[in-house]
Amino acid sequence: MYEEGPIRRISAALRRDYLREARSHDLSIGEVGVWRNVMSPDPTERRQWVRYAKDQLALADDIGARCCVNISGNAGPGGWDQYSPENYADGTYEHIVETTQDIIDAVDPRQTVYTIECMPWMVPDSPHGYLQLIKEVDRTAFATHLDYTNMIHGIDRWHALPAFIDECFDLLTAHIVSVHIKDIRLHSGLPTSITEVGSPAADRSTSMRCCAGSPSWTTPRPSSWSTCPIERPTRKRWPSCWTSPANCPRASRTRTSLPTAPLYGWIIVRSVHPTVPFRYMSPSI
């Protein structure tokens, strides 16, 4: 059994209390975040954060979170999540594979998986690249945390956004355990600038259609559909309460009362637009 290090140690009682409170509000734990630079060029810092990643993966496994998520990390100078030429230097890709394998093998999770969030300036920066990384890591406990917005780093992908979302799901469906769906905006002026927040420009309808049409990796359905008064989704259509929580017969003014359906529990939809409400925010530890 993996033994947690001193960096991250949470009492079993606190974990049980957290889980009991979450379940009492119909919430599942979507992800446990690492958000540390396991590719740091500083050896001491790198060892520290690799150990932290193992601790977080062990925590995710203990509480049955859907995944533990990090980014591959910045192999050069600068912020942990920023670009540097070293991110694409010879040997970096192999180091990412080996580090990911080391984290997974040390913990050997049984109830969760380790994932890497897509980024525009480090591996994986494309759905094809993510699929190749999955093959190279070659661990059943390594899966996909899909954030296609983070891969929209040029006008070609912006212009063909619905097709790009389809491509992501077509290539990675069998491996996806978590999805971030976020708003993005193309700004005027030069050079090209695409930011994560703004008016609702991201094609959520395409995203929801793809999610609803991929039953093999959605959150387990209720024991009986008769216990949930929403209709079963199809590839082309999903229940009205997924479009507007106000339409859900079980929803109240709080998000914690949303029904237990395939979509909820692993998708985070984030919006800053005043007319677009939060659909669901999964607890992240």
Image (cartoon, rainbow, N blue to C red):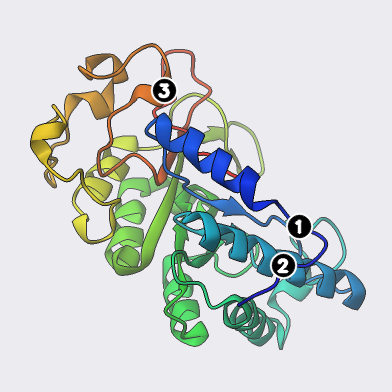
**Circle 3: residue type:** Arg
Nearer the viewer's eye, disc 3 or disc 1?
Answer: 1
Element type at mark 1: loop
**Which residue is identified by label 3?**
255
In the image, residue 39 above or below residue 274: below
Q: Where does residue 241 sit, x and y in percent of width and height?
A: 23, 24
In the image, residue 256 above or below residue 190: above
Q: How far is disc 2 from disc 3 in space, using C-alphas? A: 33 Å
Determine crowd level at label 2: few under 14, some 14-19, many 20+ residues with C-alpha closer than 10 A.
some
Visible residue check, residue 126:
yes
Element type at mark 3: helix
Residue 117 appears left or right of 175: right
Residue 119 appears left or right of 109: right
Q: Where does residue 140 sit, x and y in percent of width and height?
A: 42, 79
**Disc marking residue 4:** 2
Q: Which of marks 3 and 1 is nearer the N terminus?
A: 1
**Disc marking residue 8:** 1
**Circle 1: residue type:** Arg
Nearer the viewer's eye, disc 2 or disc 3?
Answer: 2
Q: Which residue is drawn at 18% across and 24% down?
A: 240
Q: Where does residue 144 sit, x and y in percent of width and height?
A: 44, 64
